[in-house]
Amino acid sequence: MKYKLSLFAATIACLIALTACGSSASAPASAPDAAVSSDRLSVVTTIFPEYDWTREVLGDNPAEADLRLLIDAGVDLHSYQPTASDMVDISTCDLFIYVGGESDEWVDDALKEAVNPDMVVLNLMDILGDRVREEEIVEGMQEDEHHNHEAEEGYDHEEHHHEHGEVEYDEHVWLSLNNAQLCCESIANALSELDPDHAADYAANADSYGKKLEALDEQYRGAVSEGTYHTLLFGDRFPFRYMTEDYGLDYYAAFVGCSAETEASFETVTFLAGKLDKLGLPCILTIEGPDHRIAETIVQNTASKDQKVLTMNSLQSITAQDAAGGMTYLSAMENNLEVLKEALD
């Protein structure tokens, strides 16, 4: 990975130079991957939640900014590798928004190559501070060599910054509606800093959107309080730590949210099947994706073998095409609420 990034760094200067040499007065300033004119903000976001939150904060002023979703082809956050073009877009943008977890280790190299001295950078995990949680291993969860931490701790910025092998934090901070509201406020502040003429608009848009997030949060709380069950069981990776913590839900899962495991052990399958039986849960959950074999195998090892397999969207693989087709952060989280209601009833 470091070797690949060094090649990217060597290529960036050439690409920027070529862009500059090839530009002219007739060149289209709105080209999505071209250097944008100084009177338009250039905003690059790594994942869909950040992209959609920024759309909401921009509101009626989208013409004031060129907004790009970087991981826009359905690639999972954990396996994304930036292209040379991606690195150029980051190095020249006005506002760059990223998650800040271990999957974003490549960002340091991209920022070192930045040619915009006034760039504003938002790291979601820095924004959220003590709300960020260490990945945890719950009973029955299959461990690997990278996920053997037991205690839940707050987020310490000095200790966290790329200390490989010591502390691993749960990156999926966007799956908390409360976290989303805090992030939107920071996005509004950043846009206001870069574009003070529209600062009042950005603040108003963030406030209006925050009320929608609060309303959906209340619906989640109502669903949990009215539910028959209080435990979720995932036959998959588990990226919903922040959601369950928000609403006081218990959970069991095959793997932690960032696990690279694709096969569950006999012990994991047996344990989770036993939990389904013991708790009488009507459903087992998975995250988006075509392969639900682990969940189906767990069901086949229960006594009744009739639990439903339901899917919740972790919003990690939503594409630019999905966004253009009407997918929003709120609509995805509303769909997750309906799944949650069925899992708890």
Image (cartoon, rainbow, N blue to C red):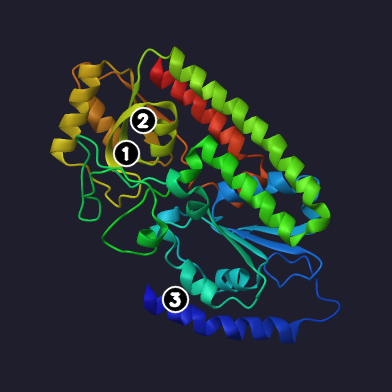
Q: Quadrant of the C terminus?
A: top left
Label 2 Cα crowd, 10 Å radius (few <14 / some 14-19 / many 20+): many
Check contact, mark 2 vs mark 1: CB within 8 A. Answer: yes
Position of 59 relative to 101 (above/below): above
Distance between the Cα atoms at labels 2 and 1? 8 Å
Image point 55% across, 21% down: which residue? 219
Check disc 1 and report the residue beneath it: 236
| Whether residue 240 is visible | no
Looking at marks 3 and 1 on the same chain, the residue that comes earlier in the sequence is marked by 3
- The front one of 173 and 306 is 173
The answer to whether 21 appears left or right of 147 in the picture is right
Q: Amino acid at mark 3?
A: Leu
Label 3 Cα crowd, 10 Å radius (few <14 / some 14-19 / many 20+): some
Q: Quadrant of residue 46?
A: bottom right
Check disc 2 and report the residue beneath it: 285
| Mark sitting on residue 284 | none
Q: Quadrant of residue 253?
A: top left
Image point 48% across, 39% down: which residue? 175
Looking at marks 3 and 2 on the same chain, the residue that comes earlier in the sequence is marked by 3
Check contact, mark 3 vs mark 1: CB within 8 A. Answer: no
